[in-house]
Amino acid sequence: MYFGSVKFFRHLIVVTTALFIAASLALVILFAIENKNLKRQLEEYEALRNIGETTDNVSDTTDTDTVNATDETTEGDTSPQDVWPPAPSGEYAGMFPDLYAVNAPWELVLDEDAGGHVYLTFDDGPNDNAPNYKTTEILNYLKEKDVSATFFVVPRESSASVLRRIDAEGHTIGVHSYTHAYEQIYESVEAFLEDFNQARTLIYEQTGILSDIFRYPGGSINDYNKDTRADIIAEMERRGFICFDWNVDSNDTKASYDTMIQEVPKKIHENYDAGRRSIVLFHDNSAHGSWVVRPLIKLLDEHQNEYEFRTLSPNVRALRWSSE
């Protein structure tokens, strides 16, 4: 009988040994193949990691160069002052945060000055102290002669129609004051800004004009602003507003008609000879100022090749006594 015989067990041992050897060889082969695959995957991983590191290095370098180039461009082409309105700074920056000139100072292209340029300017109207009819009278003269002028106004709720006429007929409106109370407005920087803002806001409400030009009541140097002058001027300049004092005073608040009609043209001629423009001060409410306007224009018209009447604007070089 084969099963259970010695021969059966011999064959069983041989087959089992062969199967064991075959299985071991198969495992060795499988391990070799798997090892080869793992080695290849490891090499691929290392290669990818090296490529990634190289890419990161290139990317870091590129980003740095880009940032540096951008910084250089920024530093070369722009500066903090190219932002308007400027960032809040200084003691008064928190007051009236919207009270800044419309035009950034560095964007203005200034007109060329000429000795023959004559700027007629009128202060203090139209209001109860400088009645509307006075300003209207001046406007009639200017219209008759086809001459434009600049009005530094002290507006009131009742002045809307006159202010709109000033604008409609080609004249310029500048800010003068709301209260025109020297002791009050020059008491502090805060007081001046409050008065200025009140006047400028009312002008805007009545005409739609946000004026960037102004004239200090009494001029930039007067007996009332000795203690506050420097700080007020610095703050107004920081906010971009443009001051116009005058270099021809008509003295219309006290001089006679005869004196004015002689002295005003004389001063204008002197400025012309010296190559200086003339910014002439009149007042809406003066006794004789409006009467002098017509003959003054006529006198200057006789030298029409020399003189040209113009209006002040942000593009006209500022005139402030302490900086002249």
Image (cartoon, grey):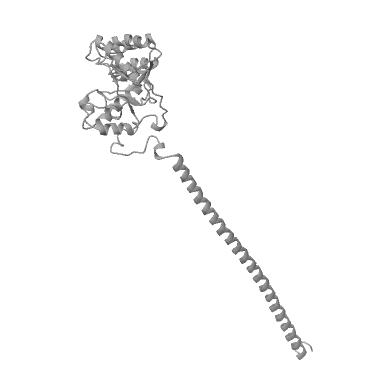
Q: Among all residues in the image, which is located at the extreme right?
A: 1
Q: Is residue 69 above or below residue 92?
A: below
Question: Residue at image x 31%, y 20%?
Answer: 152
Number of numbered markers: 0
Q: Quadrant of the C terminus?
A: top left
Residue 82 percent coordinates (x, y) = 41, 37
Residue 206 visible? The answer is no
Rendered view: 7 above or below 81: below
Counting from the top left corner in percent of width and height, residue 9 is at 74, 88
Residue reaching furthest bottom?
6
Q: Give the x, y percent position of residue 253.
A: 23, 15
Q: Closest to the observer: 174 or 201?
A: 174
Quarter assignment of residue 241 = top left
The answer to whether residue 124 is above or below residue 63 is: above
Q: Residue furthest front?
A: 273
Place of residue 63 in the rendered image (x, y in percent of width and height, measured from the top left): 51, 50
What residue appears at the point 51 percent right and 48 percent down from the top-left corner? 66
